[in-house]
Amino acid sequence: MARAVTAASRPRATGSVGLLIGTRKGAFILRGDRSRRTWKLFPPMFLGHIIHHLVLDPRDGRTLLMAASTGHLGPTVFRSTDRGKTWKEATAPPAFPKVPEGQQGREVGHVFWLTPAHAREPGVWYAGTSPQGLFRSEDGGVSWAPFSSINDDPQYRAWMGSVQDGTPDGPKLHSILVDPRDPAHLYFAMSGGGVHESRDRGKTWAPLVQGLDVVEGFDPANVAFHDPHCVRLCPNNPDRLYQQNHCGIYRLDRPSDRWMRIGKNMPKQIGDIGFPIVLHPRDPDTVWVFPMDGGSVWPRVSPGGKPAAYVTRNAGKTWVRQDKGFPRSNAWWTVKRQAMTADTNNPVGLYLGTTSGEIWASRTGGANWTCLARHLPEIYSVEAAAL
Amino acid sequence: MTVHIPSALRSYTGHKSWVEAEGRTLAEVLSALERRHPGLRFRIVTEQDRIRPHIRIFVNETQAQTLETPLRPGDQIHIVCALSGG
């Protein structure tokens, strides 16, 4: 089994953690002390802006990129090179090419996902948009250009579908993953439109959907019907990926191309539906999910109003409920795909944000949970960073 | 001609609510604004040169439907952030 030690996978026994929180009404930083017991919430940044993702560049430890829009204004990217003290706007945010008069061109609704590129490519970033588009910046997020052919490829456009085929606030390209051993080996996912892989730095892509289920009555051979909610790559075993899909929890061990539905091993009354999936920074067998109710009309809230994370420590063979500290009843939480994450400390800290504006954390790998903040706006994303 | 800038866009104009710009069409005025206030245009006009869904642009008191709307010296332009939900 190939192992790769990355910046993300190095243990940090007592490092302080900053949570980068994107909400429907602005961005927030929640900073913990070295013990992760005391937290300070800083005033909102870009109050009133819709912040889908806020990410620290692990290559320099000081550059932050923020995917932003507002209810009125078009999408953009803000960037800070001093850990959030000052911000500048991208001079050329992600945008599709202008098409000739009479043709129907696409328009970026919002930037949804930001991924720093490989450690050997400083200043390079990838962005995923709604509707589905893949973009790249080579100057630290100042200017962006469409990346690779998928944005205009007829087959990919067919798999992307229309606005009506995607999530309620627009179909999305997300889960852009970079193999830490090879900057040319990339993955991304689309809701809807499946998981895709490139081994030649995005020149060509191939679907990676074997073994994934789709909604009953539809043909899983049609890539358009696949809805991966969140795909993650193990930091220290890049041959292993995990996925929380609209239809279950999966694991993929390369070189196989066939996903295994490890969510079948979840308790039947809970099911294996949800949005986020979180990987241990050093143990490729340990994964957390936060199940949602996928019954009848898909409420997408904690089953029974009883929030719980579930952890597997054997790559999905068995799952253990983790709900100590969470409300015992009447807590109808929704946690979005970017709103649950882990730090790299030992023991691992876990963090999640609810659409009802609460941040919860565990310093014990999910064994106990405490509320760090409440009354925030609707939370879209939470990233743990060494701040 | 004068252009009224809504509060959501004044970070681009040095917090000025009124700015001057010249052009024979709305497209030319917006290009002039973009040269002077980089980044402003893309927040209100898409990459396909369509006025964004929750933005309205009025020339004097008439709503402009396209960027090809002709302008005359002395026209007054209002950029308005329309209702977009809570």
Image (cartoon, rainbow, N blue to C red):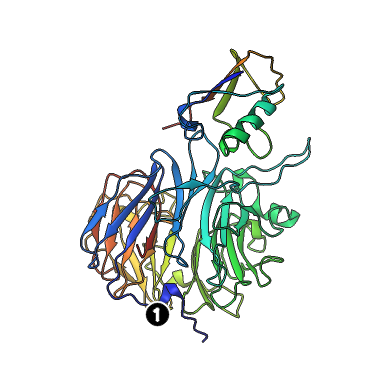
Residue A214 visible in rendering: no
* The C terminus of chain A, quarter of image: bottom left
Q: Is residue A199 visible?
A: yes
Q: Is residue A259 above or below residue A161?
A: below
Give left or right: position of A385 versus A133: left
Query: Which residue occupies the foreground of this view, A218 or B46?
Result: B46
Chain bearing tag 1 is A
> Where does residue A3 sit, x and y in percent of width and height?
49, 84
Q: Amino acid at mark 1?
A: Asn
Direction from residue A144 to residue A342 in the image, left or right: left
From the top left corner, tell me how far across and down residue A200 is, in percent. 68, 71
Q: Which residue is mark 1?
A: A314
Q: Nearer the viewer, residue A266 or B61?
A: B61
Q: What is the quadrant of residue A213 in the picture?
A: bottom right
Image quarter for residue A278?
Answer: bottom left
Give the residue displayed 28% in from the left and 61% down from the top: A361
Q: Residue B2, relative to residue A140: is it above or below?
A: above
* Residue at 49% across, 81% down: A4
Please provide percent x and percent y for residue A42: 29, 49
Q: Quadrant of residue B22?
A: top right
The residue at the point 53 percent across, 74 percent down is: A260
